[in-house]
Amino acid sequence: MASPADLIRPHVSSIPLYVPGKPMEEVERELGIVAAKLASNENPLGPAPEVIDAIIREAPRINLYPELEAPVLRTAIARKLGVAEDSVLVTAGASHFLEIAALAYIGPGFEGVSPWPSFVHYAIASRMAGGEFKPLQAADPRKATIEEILNGISPHTRLLFIANPNNPTGAHYSRAELEELLSGLPERVMVVWDEAYFEYVTASDYPDGVAYLSREPQLLVTRSFSKVYALAGLRIGYGVGHPSIIAQLARIRGPFKISIPAQAAALAAFAAVDHTRRSVNLVVEGRRYLAEALAGLGLSVWPSQGNFVTVDVKTDASAVAERLERVGYIVRPLKPFGLANSLRVTVGTMAQNEGFVRALAEMRSVR
Ligand SMILES: Cc1ncc(COP(=O)(O)O)c(C=O)c1O
């Protein structure tokens, strides 16, 4: 007899479970120490005080359904970006926008693709939509060339996900590369250009994806309030695209996904410019420090435009991650991407960065 679980559509059981960074609380409970979570690319400063005030102010209203379109926030986003309001879809994180795009463009017989390694949710979202996902393995795992990406597109491809800068490599595509991509793209393929780490970029050749939207209807751009705005736990982000597409995507966003406190917090985060500047500076200084300090240990770090660095520890990185965890540093081993010797380390506070380097140095000296 078939069990109720067998009635679940087969594509669901093929979806990989998202594996989050180990929660700080879990490590602290197990080891009785204060842990530094450098595994999920969160903002170590926490939200701005004004953001906390906004959440507290709205807390008594969580008995109410929120406004569907998050209209005040949508206006603020549109103004900041210099686009029309109907080009913006506010979502429960950039991840939610990825899911919506996948649902709209991929289904049985179609596929999403992305240069690989990249954000695991591209694979999950494609499969949630009932389609396939094809990772495009590049000759150099640090960055696929545009030619490699275009060669990986098949007649079944409907969505191309590109994180710029990329997680977990930290690499970015330049304006020239984005233009090369868009000019070589088949008409049936949409690009989801994921700028979750936009605010941390310092590279002068970095393209602002939003600036391309008016002439590139095949482009969708997504950004997040989880990173520099420190709202990962409230689930809020947005997508931007041609109004004719955004209007369709709104049909499958689902109702009331963005709570009243989340909408208010995102608005307050936009206004908290000093906190944002401090958050960016912390990352820019921290990733420079990590690159130099790890080079001092004889380890090389991949150049990164995100709030994380990937380091080759020249030995089994999963074992290194376990040992680091025992002394309170939670980092992300990249074995699932076939990078068995690499760790992704989120830039923390300076004290956390220094503590992590010290712990790694001690570990290497006793090996
Ligand atoms: C490339 C990329 N896109 C999107 C996200 C998720 O963003 P959000 O928290 O807004 O869903 C992440 C989170 O790590 C990411 O690395």
Image (cartoon, helix red, strand yellow):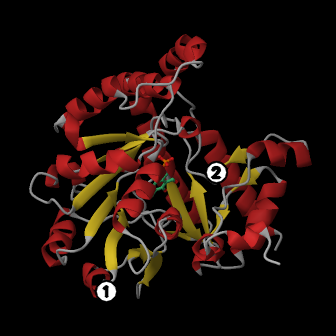
Given the current orientation, which residue lies at the most extreme front position? 1
Q: Is residue 202 visible?
A: no
Residue 244 in the image: x percent, y percent? 18, 50
> SS of the residue at dot 1?
loop
Residue 224 in the image: x percent, y percent? 42, 44
Q: How many marks?
A: 2
Residue 151 in the image: x percent, y percent? 28, 88
Three-letter amino acid code of the residue under disc 2 = Leu
Question: Which residue is label 2 attached to?
Answer: 38
Residue at 73% across, 73% down: 6
Whether label 2 lies within 8 Å of ligand 1 gets the answer no
- Taking 19 as reference, is 116 above or below it? below
Q: Quadrant of the C terminus?
A: bottom right
Question: Which residue is label 1 attached to?
Answer: 154
Residue 135 image label: none
Q: Is residue 169 visible?
A: yes
- Which of the 4 image quadrants contains residue 154? bottom left
- Which of the 4 image quadrants contains residue 56? top right
Near-viewer residue (134 or 246): 246
Three-letter amino acid code of the residue under disc 1 = Ser
- Foreground mark, 1 or 2, reads 1
Asked if the residue at tag 2 contacts the one at tag 1, i.e. Cβ–Cβ closer than 8 Å, the answer is no
- Taking 325 as reference, is 177 above or below it? below
- Left or right: 32 with respect to 164? right
Residue at 21% across, 34% down: 85
Residue 169 in the image: x percent, y percent? 47, 67
Residue at 16% across, 53% down: 213
- Which of the 4 image quadrants contains residue 311? bottom right
